[in-house]
Image: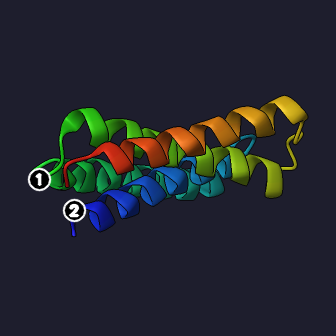
Amino acid sequence: MHWIILLIAGFCEVGFAFCLGKAKGLVGLPWWEWMGGFVLFYILSAVLLAKATEALPIGTAYPVWTGIGALGSVLIGIFIFHEPATFWRLFFLTTLIVSILGLKMLSSE
């Protein structure tokens, strides 16, 4: 169950990165709305990470959480914000995925 909570926390990290990207260049009420989403996802992500670390080692949970956030943020950047999908970006994204899976496989939970 704690791995599911950690996965949701990672997706919330992706959510706050998405909101931050959408707020870029905006002013007024639209900026405040996206920043409100940013704050909501940020708090939810941190609370869920704390909950997951009740049973998972911090040395595993934190890198997996940040890895999910990094992976999701890069994919959102490529598919939604039309950032470049260069060979090296995809190569290092692949190594990140392998590292996250490796940490999960080596975890005692």
In the rendered view, does 2 fall on the left or right side of 76? left
Asked if the residues shown at circle 1 and circle 2 are in contact, with their CB atoms under 8 angstroms apart, the answer is yes
State which quadrant residue 84 falls in.
top right
Q: Nearer the viewer, residue 94 or 73?
A: 94
Q: Position of residue 79 (x, y in %)?
A: 81, 57
Spot occupied by residue 76 in the image (x, y as percentages of width and height)? 71, 53
Q: Which residue bears the numbered disc 1?
A: 55
Residue 25 place in picture, x, y as percent: 75, 40
Specify the quadrant that holds the C terminus. bottom left
For image coordinates 50% across by 49% down, the residue present is 68
Q: Which residue in the protein does label 2 denote?
A: 2
Q: Amino acid at mark 2?
A: His
At a point 63% along the width and 36% down the height, the residue shown is 95
Q: Secondary structure at mark 1?
A: loop
**Nearer the N terminus, badge 1 or badge 2?**
2
Q: Is residue 27 left or right of residue 53?
A: right
Task: Decide which of 36, 44 is in the foreground and name it.
Answer: 44
For the view shown, which residue lies furthest in the left direction? 54
Q: Which quadrant of the figure has residue 8?
A: bottom left
